[in-house]
Amino acid sequence: MCKSQPWSKSVKVCDINMRYADWGGEGPLLLMLHGAMRTSRSWDAVARALREEYHVISLDARGHGDSDWTQRGYRFTNRVEDIRAFCRELDIRDATAVGHSNGAVVFAMLADKHPEFFRGLVLLEPMLVVGETPGELPPPRRTGRRRRTWSDRDELREYLKQHPATRGWREDVILDVVDLETVELANGRIDMKWSPDTLNIDDRQGERFDLRPILSATGLPTLFVASQQRASRFADVQPIAAATPNFHFTTVNNTGHNMYMERPDAVAALIASFLSGNAVPGVV
């Protein structure tokens, strides 16, 4: 029997305590990693849809959620090393990695060097190139910019329901964000649970990579998921999918970059179809 909420666990990797949400279960392992300004709990709606058949673990990356917040360590090489150490510490083998944005980049780069950890990849809109084109929105920026907070969680909930970037999130997902991805400050105001240092451009100066050759060469079954609003940005991936065995490209209609928070059931169904070997639709 699966519990209604995941266990919160922690493991020491590299120089940090890394927290993760473990939904339990005996099925195949799904390892989930969020992108910028999110936490492990942004996956809750997807995890609830999959937990009966799979063992779902979602991680708080360095500087996010309840993992340690450090001033430095946010280059992709650092992030990959954090997750490599996590997989080794938990003796993970044959997991399906499900990553969004930055998290998808990390999983693809890690699978390129250590495919033994994984049996497949589900990549939701990773950046394809860094160093030539702008990175994930919002781009890395220098710290010092005033950070927005809210008077209470009700104000934050209304803000998320109206903001152009978040108003498409499903209602239960918004409630998860408000309840689980926030922290109450000493002055009583509500802040999001991620460190501004994660967006410090000084820590990522000179980063360059091209993910496209990695996508072609991992040899792992791969599901690449794009949102309808941004699918044109990933036109370079479709020829890779056509030429690469066990590589699927899917677009999720009526969504933007955070498609797993807007249509979590659709994303969960795609993951389940991909893992079961059923035909993966090109559009959902």
Image (cartoon, grey):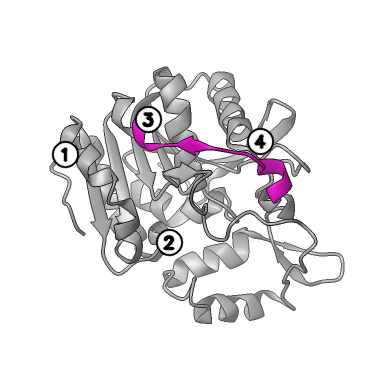
| Kind of residue at disc 1 | Ala
Element at label 3: helix
Element at label 1: helix
Of callouts 4 and 1, which one flags the residue occurring earlier in the amino acid sequence? 4
Of callouts 2 and 4, which one flags the residue occurring earlier in the amino acid sequence? 4
Of callouts 3 and 2, which one flags the residue occurring earlier in the amino acid sequence? 3
Q: So how many labels did they put on this image?
A: 4
Residue located beneath label 3 in the image:
214
Residue located beneath label 1 in the image:
242
Q: Residue at x 39, y 57 (%)?
A: 260
Q: Residue at x 80, y 61 (%)?
A: 144
- Vertical side of 224 occupied by 227: above or below: below
| Kind of residue at disc 3 | Ile
Q: Quadrant of residue 158?
A: bottom right
* Residue 80 percent location from the top left of the image: 56, 31
* Residue 238 percent location from the top left of the image: 23, 46
| Kind of residue at disc 4 | Met
65 sits left or right of 170 in the view: right
Q: CA distance from mark 2 to mark 4?
A: 23 Å
